[in-house]
Image: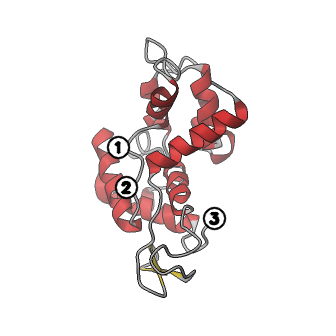
Amino acid sequence: MRQALISDDRVIDELKKAAAETLTIDVATIKADSSLVKDLGAESLDFLDINYRVEQAFSIKMARHFIIEHIEEMFGEGTALDADGRLTEKAVKLMKIRLDAAEDGSGFDSLEPGMDMDALPAMITIRSMAKGIMDILDTLPKDCPSCGKSAWKTENETHIVCGACGAEAVYKNGDDLIKEWLQKTQDEHKII
């Protein structure tokens, strides 16, 4: 269910703020389509810090593993990466479906079988990260699990709480969402 309490723009703004604080750069220099690696200079540890800041802002749990790792775990070693650490055709098909690659301007539309896995982090943009966060936020249940009422509201523009009992919203975590999506996509498309 698509929640309407926190907008895409709000998520992008929070991501820009998290990236600016982590990378000690001016938030005004960050665009939605900025590559965290190529444009902003992020390194692998910076991604952890940005994820932590976003988790705190929205009270969510981001994915700890990239889609490639989940493909390998669920469908077997060698399904997503060949012996040389290069993307397989199946992995590219799944990633393009997941990331709506041709439409978001993230750079993921340039994914090709045979690419080195190490090229993937440079394709991650503020916008592509925001999509993952919105996917998590969109798991907001219709009714509050604590009181059963449908009275969600936002606090501080980033936290969703029940207006009836004050309970914080509970969401699915990023890794579980990726796994659910992979299973559903495999069932529908038979890619693997």
Q: Is mark 3 on a helix, strand or loop?
A: loop
- Which residue is farthest top? 83
Q: Circle 1 sits on which residue?
A: 42
Residue 108, position in %: x, y? 58, 36
Q: Is mark 1 on a helix, strand or loop?
A: loop
Q: Which of marks 2 and 3 is nearer the N terminus?
A: 3
Look at 47% across and 32% down and name the residue there: 120
Kindly indicate whether the residue at mark 1 contacts the one at mark 2 (C-beta within 8 angstroms): yes
Look at 49% across and 17% down and name the residue there: 78
Q: Circle 2 sits on which residue?
A: 19
Considering only vertical position in the picture, is 125 above or below 76? below
Q: Circle 3 sits on which residue?
A: 2
The one of 110 and 134 positioned closer to us in this rendering? 134
In space, the residues marked 2 and 1 are separated at their CA atoms by 8 Å
Residue 106, position in %: x, y? 57, 43
Considering only vertical position in the picture, is 151 above or below 107? below
The kind of residue on which mark 3 rests is Arg
Q: Is mark 2 on a helix, strand or loop?
A: helix
Mark 2 or 3, closer to the camera: 3
Kindly indicate whether the residue at mark 3 contacts the one at mark 2 (C-beta within 8 angstroms): no
